[in-house]
Image: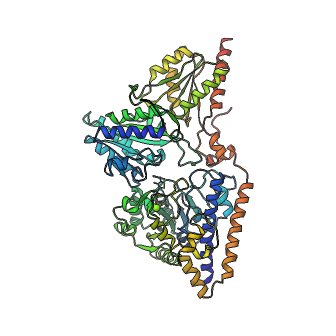
Amino acid sequence: MTQELLYWQALNRALDAEMAADESVFILGEDVGLYGGSYRVTEGLYAKYGEARVRDTPISENSFTGLGVGAALVGMRPVVEIMTINFAMLALDSIVNGAAKIPFMSGGQFPMPLVIRVPGGIARQLAAQHAQRLESMFMNVPGLRVAVPATPQDAYWQLRQAIASDEPVVLLEHEVLYFTKGPVDPMAEPPPIHQAAIRRSGKDLTLIGYSRSALQVQEAAVELAKEGIEAEAIDLRSLNPIDWQTLIDSVNKTHRALIVEEDCRHAGAGAEIAASLAERCFFSLDAPVQRVAGLDLPTPYNGALEAASIPRVADIVAAARALIGAKEKAAA
Amino acid sequence: MEREMMHRLLRDMLLSRVFEERAAEEYQKGNIVGFLHLYPGEEAVAAGVINAAGPADYIVSTYREHAHALVRGVPARAVMAELFGRATGMSGGMGGSMHMFDRQRRFMGGYGIVGETYPIAIGIGYAVMLRALPETVICFFGDGAVPQGTFHESLNMAALWRLPVLFVCENNHYAIGTEIHRHSAVPEVYKRAAAYNIPAEKVDGMDVLKVYAATRHALDRIRRAGGPQFLEFETYRYRGHSMADPGAYRPPVEVKAFQAIDPLTVGARAIEFRYPTAAELAEVGPDNIGRLTEHMISAGHLEEAEIAQLRKDVEAEVEDAVQFSLASPQPTMDDAWRHLHCNRHHEQLLTA
Ligand SMILES: Cc1ncc(C[n+]2csc(CCOP(=O)(O)OP(=O)(O)O)c2C)c(N)n1
Ligand SMILES: [Mg+2]
């Protein structure tokens, strides 16, 4: 039965469903229990499942994430919440050297059914150490899956799929999406966790986004339609692996692509996608693949500067127009 | 202790309290945005510790550092303007509440990552040791930062290499919503230092005179004997963890009990604070600043009229800081790039 839920509620329901169904699922993180989670995602679960399965940890990111790795080795399904992605920097050893490597370096002896949930992105004036995206850092690690839900429906299903998966999954949740609302159907058969979704189809150009920027490209597509430009809006949903087939099919149809990422431009998701599309679609492209991205700048505290450091819908619309213009020039 | 220092402690605590309560108001008005962690209740620690330090000592602080900056002598204007994100702020509007820096005053930053102050402090300490200077480093951290790995790693190195670092734990019993008994197997923080042979002491952090004396002592020992020292100050924050947190997880009796030993009650009694309310403050008995104030009065160092004047001065200073901030320019994107590339010496990689 479909319900309207906030993004955080969808995550909460997903955790509840998995914990009820499987005793090996447990949660740990800072203030996830008694306090109910910084973004309310674990609200109510402490009362329902008790402190051993919803564990409030000390501020010891590397070791409690590593605890998750150890528990996963022996068949538990831990869901580690790292309060924000900024603090995941302290747990990189457990994530990169541990979770991502053990299945491989044990010659496939050990599955790694570990989920690491991390809120991140630019919220509102949280300043340089609390306003980072950093997804490219995780994308670059073989052995990790990186899921980036943009809607409550995807948040619900991708979290459930992540918990059920035997691979380590980093679920990147955007802080400004927690209080967005959308339908969640807990019965609908979900697409695979990594499959991209075409949110709007069009023939003139392909707009590619993920997480918050997946919503922005849809808004931009609506704006562009008013000018007679039919943009195809794709929500990647996963950054590792990337659903190349959906992107290639779209670009072969539209002949131009624009990637939108909130993360810094340098060596980001957009760079990976642009390079791969250039390799695979060179002869069907009418113009170089373009990027709209965050500035290569630590996030300034000042509100106006912060806003100017990340993509806005108007920037996407302008870049799309320029890309169409480039095509028309080429045809003339 | 000399009269002058007592006056200074009283003034610093009062300024810190009035400043923070005003910051809360400005946050509600939308002039300050983002995370704002306030200090009311803990003033005796900043005032006692930092006043015991000399101008050549370094301060490394956390995200709850406005009062540390004020006590260190940073003008209220520069602290408030940073909260407002203005170009005239301590960090040019780039850092905000959690990232205040003042190179000249050796205020080496407010850091937002819990447990980040230790390695930075021992690094500064290492440099001081190499240069054989009579300087020390004061490293602030909360009770919640003690379980972080960097605590153990850094204390070990500080002891091993006899670094001139004073570790100062502001133990307010909470890491956001998690009470210390739920985050630490050994809740007596000072005992943890024993694992690294660092002399440590637990001190009543609601009593500014004790804080000051203990810090003087510890800094003397560092300068005389070398090697780190460790102080745990027991204190309490009256507000939630940040403006985003009402602090609802704390039993009201506990909040009340600590308000009863408010380091500021007497000095501040006529001021309208939103939290705790004037009525609540009136209810509680004599407290630490109360004790300080009474001590000063009975020793002939302070008159009732002086308290009133002090209060007026401090309020005027904070009001001036707000007006200054409102009138200050916003930083530009050019400023932002300049700060990022401040060490690049105009290097050009791409010619347009
Ligand atoms: C590495 C890291 N993990 C988590 C956080 C989120 N966080 C900010 S403050 C805080 C509690 C810290 O408590 P404590 O050290 O006692 O300082 P207090 O806030 O009480 O002054 C937490 C969990 C963080 N900033 N950095
Ligand atoms: Mg604390």
Residue at the extreme right of the image, as rendered: B327
Residue A157 position in % (x across, y down): 40, 32
- Please give the count of numbered marks on the rendered protein: 0
Q: Is residue B250 above or below residue A308?
A: below
Residue A159 is drawn in which quadrant?
Answer: top left
- State how the image is colored: rainbow
Residue A325 visible here:
yes
Residue B42, image x and y in percent?
A: 53, 68
In the displayed structure, would residue B16 be above or below residue A217? below
Q: Nearer the viewer, residue A18 or B130?
A: A18
Looking at the image, the residue that sits furthest to the bottom is B299
| Picture quarter with the C terminus of chain B | top right
Q: Residue A22 versus residue B14: which sits nearer the camera?
A: A22
User: Residue B149's image quarter?
Assistant: bottom left
Residue A283 horizontal/vertical position (percent): 54, 14
Q: Of residues A154 and B323, which is closer to you in this image?
A: A154
**Does residue B171 appear in this view?**
no
Residue B286 percent across, percent down from the top left: 53, 79
Measuring 49% from the left and 58% from the top, which residue is drawn there? Answer: B247
Residue B158 falls in image quadrant: bottom left
> Which quarter shows the N terminus of chain B?
bottom right
Question: Residue, x 53% and y 77% (percent of image)?
Answer: B285
- In the picture shown, does residue A179 fall above or below A229? below
